[in-house]
Image (spheres, rainbow, N blue to C red):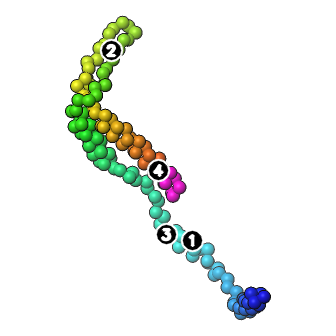
Amino acid sequence: MGENKDIEKLDAFTKKYIKEVKEESPSLDFTANLMTVLEKETVNIYKATPLISRKGWFFLGVILVASILFVSRGTSLSWMKMPTLQLDFSYHIQMPNLFEGITISNIMLFACFFFTLMIFGQIIMLKNHFTKHL
């Protein structure tokens, strides 16, 4: 009950206040003034920049190759052999075993696999983040 009295008092006050306030109208050149102000404003266009620069990717690639070569000096797994290729015209091309001396440990294999999974996970997460927020 007390709330209705307060609402009625507030309603009466607002009606009285609205009657006392003068009605304002914009000037004749309001639109022209507004357009000049809007023309002066500069819009900053968002330019997408990569999170990791080319130098950064190059540096990461060098580190990855160096770590693979450093760890591959171990002698636990030798699994890369080039097969003999047979072409249609009966000419046999035999590739030398370029990767015969390279051995990769199981730990390095798992580390490369895990690193690849994490990169793909980051790409998916960042794509979703920027899709939602831009």
Q: Residues within 10 Å of mark 2 (few under 14, many from 20)?
A: few
- Quick check: 128 left or right of 71? right
Choose between 41 and 114: the one closer to the eye: 114
Circles 2, 1 touching at the beta carbon (< 8 Å): no
- Read off the residue under disc 4: 125
Q: Position of residue 63 (x, y in %)?
A: 26, 43
Between the residue at mark 1 and the residue at mark 3, the CA separation in whole angstroms equals: 10 Å
Residue 84: mark: 2
Q: Give the residue displayed 67% in from the left and 85% down from the top.
A: 24
Q: Residues within 10 Å of mark 3 (few under 14, many from 20)?
A: few
Instruction: Give the residue type at disc 3.
Output: Glu
Q: Which residues are magenta?
A: 127-134
Of the residues under marks 2 and 1, which one precedes in the sequence?
Answer: 1
Q: Give the residue displayed 30% in from the left and 37% down from the top.
A: 108
Between the residue at mark 2 and the residue at mark 1, the CA separation in whole angstroms equals: 75 Å
- Read off the residue under disc 3: 41
Instruction: Give the residue type at disc 2.
Output: Thr
* Location of residue 11 by image quarter: bottom right
Of the residues under marks 4 and 3, which one precedes in the sequence?
Answer: 3
Between the residue at mark 4 and the residue at mark 3, the CA separation in whole angstroms equals: 35 Å
- For label 4, the SS is helix
- For label 1, the SS is helix
- Magenta-colored stretch includes residue 133: yes
Between the residue at mark 4 and the residue at mark 2, the CA separation in whole angstroms equals: 42 Å
